[in-house]
């Protein structure tokens, strides 16, 4: 096996150059500020966790977790999500805090890349967890907050798909009783959005055509809140009916928030059906097929850490949002870029130049660089358009010189 070249990186990781980092930090600050205004306080957890605790509780499959051994031989994992680590903290360090807990985060997470090209092994998530509130209003709050965060990020054209894990579960238990393995396979197809595989498996099932038709109709349960009426006609399951009732109630509260125009119902969306226990949701930008946000209710996770409490939350796919915003920034002026000033000086006026630079650095929004010129050196500053200058291959909004016998801007 050949050694990697000095400039090579492992598959799935990337370098972030200064202009990208600037946009990432700005996005992080904007979103966390919105979360704070809604009462969510930021938390930080370790990059490394024990596999037997957080790793085992995570929804990330074992094959996608990065594992390593500590010096004592215990298996560690790089965190693959933030929900499980926060659940650990809520059940330990915050066990005496009154519920509900409102926690926010911005962190990098790690997942072994899949075979397909372009998958990240390290990426950023910004999200919240609302722990200890089982109400419909809590579900609506996190959906409305997710919408507010996406709007604050600068995304304009996006929609939030709203579903419920209990509907498909109840419907399949009703129509496919005794076919547990087939139920699981059908759910896997829905989870992966493999509707062709879903339809092909339906055709092979030894059940009546009426049952097949009802299950096939699930693929058309996407649209406005009127979808809920059609969904009730397909099954007599009490569990499915309760799911639809909760979905309607959440939609009603979202109307009170004034964001229902951002929301559509999608009962094909079940999230990770071994993890979510109620409302699920995903945010989609018009320009991207993959979700930029996902979340939902998970009422049993904290039990694995010894504290029984309902919970709901979401995570923004910060990298995907950044990619979308980056494309737009390339097409227009990057408003996040600071006003760059260059101060050129010689030995005779060093103290004045440095004092002026320090004063300017105290002003918000300014980036100030300094450069010492050799005695007699002439600064080769060129005009770059109407409002900028070029020096040594770099662009500045303003160039100030402190040279012996002169001072100019």
Image (cartoon, helix red, strand yellow):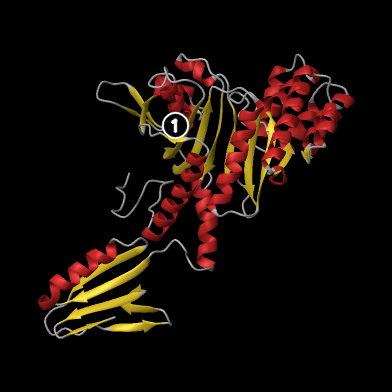
SS category of the residue bearing label 1? loop
Query: Residue 25 placed where, x, y %?
Result: 41, 51
Position in image of residue 329 (x %, y %): 51, 63
Residue at image x 44%, y 23%?
Answer: 90
Q: Which residue is mark 1?
A: 65
Q: Quadrant of the C terminus?
A: bottom left
Quadrant of the rendered structure where residue 54 is? top left
Residue 76 is situated, as x and y percent measured from the top left of the image, at 35, 26
Q: Residue at x 31, y 71 (%)?
A: 341
Q: Residue at x 53, y 49 (%)?
A: 320
Residue 165 higher or lower than 118, as above or below:
above
Residues 16 and 160: in front is 160
Q: Residues within 10 Å of mark 1 (few under 14, many from 20)?
A: many
* Pick the front one: 238 or 386: 386
Towards the viewer: 108 or 194: 108
- In this rendering, position of residue 378 left or right of residue 6: left
Q: Quadrant of the N terminus?
A: top left
Find residue 69 and report its horizontal and vertical position in percent. 31, 26
Q: Left or right of 221: which side holds 74?
A: left
């Amino acid at each position: 096996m050949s050694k990697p070249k000095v400039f090579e990186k492992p598959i799935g990781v990337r370098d972030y150059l200064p202009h990208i980092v600037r946009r990432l930090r700005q996005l992080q600050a904007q979103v966390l500020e919105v979360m704070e205004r809604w009462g969510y306080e930021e938390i930080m957890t370790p990059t490394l966790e024990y596999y037997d605790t957080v790793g085992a509780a995570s929804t990330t499959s074992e094959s996608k977790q990065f594992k390593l051994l500590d010096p004592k031989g215990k298996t560690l994992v790089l965190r693959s999500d933030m929900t499980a680590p926060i659940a650990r903290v809520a059940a330990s360090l915050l066990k005496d805090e009154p519920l509900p807990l409102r926690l926010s985060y911005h962190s990098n997470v790690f997942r072994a890349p899949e075979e397909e090209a372009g998958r990240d092994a390290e990426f950023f998530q910004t999200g919240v967890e609302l722990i200890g509130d089982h109400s419909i209003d809590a579900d609506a709050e996190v959906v409305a907050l997710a919408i507010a965060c996406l709007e604050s990020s600068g995304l304009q054209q996006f929609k939030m798909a709203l579903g419920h894990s209990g509907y498909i579960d109840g419907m399949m238990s009703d129509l496919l009783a005794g076919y547990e393995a087939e139920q699981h396979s059908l759910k896997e197809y829905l989870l992966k959005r493999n509707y062709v595989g879903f339809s092909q498996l339906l055709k092979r099932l030894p059940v009546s055509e009426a049952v097949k038709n009802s299950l096939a109709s699930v693929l058309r349960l996407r649209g406005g809140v009127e979808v809920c009426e059609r969904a009730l006609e397909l099954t007599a399951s009490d569990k499915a009916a309760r799911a639809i009732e909760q979905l309607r109630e959440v939609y009603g509260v979202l109307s009170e928030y004034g964001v229902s125009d951002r929301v559509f119902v999608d009962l094909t969306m079940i999230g990770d059906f071994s993890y979510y226990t109620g409302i699920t949701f995903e945010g989609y930008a018009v320009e991207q097929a993959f979700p930029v946000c996902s979340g939902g209710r998970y009422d049993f996770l904290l039990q694995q850490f010894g504290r029984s409490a309902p919970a709901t939350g979401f995570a923004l796919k910060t990298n995907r949002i950044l990619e979308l915003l980056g494309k737009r920034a390339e097409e227009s002026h990057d408003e996040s870029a600071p006003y760059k000033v260059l101060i050129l000086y010689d030995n005779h006026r060093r103290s004045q130049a440095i004092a002026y630079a320090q004063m300017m650095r105290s002003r918000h929004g300014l980036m100030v660089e300094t450069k010492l010129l050799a005695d007699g050196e002439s600064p080769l500053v060129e005009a770059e358009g109407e409002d900028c200058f070029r020096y040594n291959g770099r662009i500045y909004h303003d160039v100030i010189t402190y040279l012996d016998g002169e001072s100019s801007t």
